Amino acid sequence: MDKFLQLTLTGLTNGAIFALVALGFVLIYKASDVINFAQGDFLLVGAYIMFGMVTQVGLPWSLAVLATMILAVALGLVVERLVLRPLIGEPIISVIMVTIGLSSLLRAIVSSIWGTTGRPFPPFIPNQNISIGGAVIPADRLIAIVLAAILLILFSLFFRYSREGIAMRATADDQQAALSMGISVKRVFGLAWSIAAVTAALAGVLVANIIGVSGVVAGIGLRVFPVVILGGLDSIPGAIIGGVIIGLLETYTGGYIGGGLSQVVPFIVLILILMVKPYGLFGEVRIERV
């Protein structure tokens, strides 16, 4: 029972981080029909910016988090303006290849500034062990769950009640109708990429606090693909639920079976979901007549 509780809390931590990253995938896809293969590298950039602000610039944590979020917004806007906007109307394969190239570019920039050697992340979350029901759980994982849950709730409220969030939902449903209502679709595109970059940067900080800052952080992006396919590429609730499911599935598989199977099981789920429900558990089914 202690092992089950420990694995569950670890899986919820991973799932909450997966959900944050998946939220960025969903936002960009809903707003512009683009699958951003560089989303994992936004995590890497956010983690290293935070690392640099604290250890090299010497900012306190509160200001470092604020600076990281501002720079993440700037990164999202630059990518949207210079990468996405010129490709509007181009074949989808062209956009996909550009985002893959963007991934390599971001990694090269990070490597040129901070090198390729992994470094310990300056801890800002207490990491002492806490005993819960006989299971020993690191405090940083529990706090990461709480922080990720708060961020997901705030973003959900933003999309549901704020003017900008409603505009983003309207644009995702029908761009032409949104234009006729006076909504700036280009502004919505920029906002979607900015929020995606911020969520990824914050997730990168949470990951780096647990495993350290290195290129491994960017690998989270690939592990999130089963999450967005499971939940649905255009579903925000699906990103949250899919993140929790995949996080728990990975952890239970690694804890009870082992043998590296935990890294494979999510992609087995991805294949099964594509075979049974191609639009995911909560994705919108689109029927095109030709």
Image (tube, helix red, strand yellow):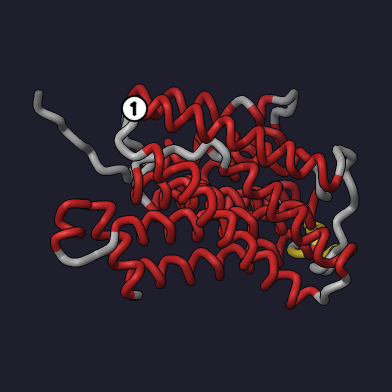
Q: Position of residue 170 (x, y in %)?
A: 24, 60
Is there any visible trace of residue 131 in the rendered image?
no
State the residue in front, 120 or 153: 120
Tell which residue pokes out farthest to the left in this image: 290
State the residue in front, 61 or 127: 61
Q: What element carries label 1?
A: loop
Q: Where is residue 285 in the image (x, y as percent from the top left)?
A: 22, 38
Q: Tell me what residue is drawn at x 9 percent, y 23 percent.
A: 290
State the residue in front, 32 or 30: 32
Residue identified by numbered label 1: 91
Q: Tell me what residue is drawn at x 35 percent, y 59 percent.
A: 188
Q: Tell me what residue is drawn at x 46 percent, y 50 percent.
A: 81
Q: Where is residue 159 in the image (x, y as percent from the top left)?
A: 37, 66
- Number of other residues with Cα within 10 Å of mark 1, as a class: few under 14, some 14 to 19, many 20 or more: few
Q: Where is residue 1 in the image (x, y as percent from the top left)?
A: 70, 50
Q: Tell me what residue is drawn at x 73 percent, y 28 percent.
A: 258
Q: Which quadrant of the structure image shows residue 115? A: top right
20 vs 116: above or below: below
82 vs 122, left or right, is left
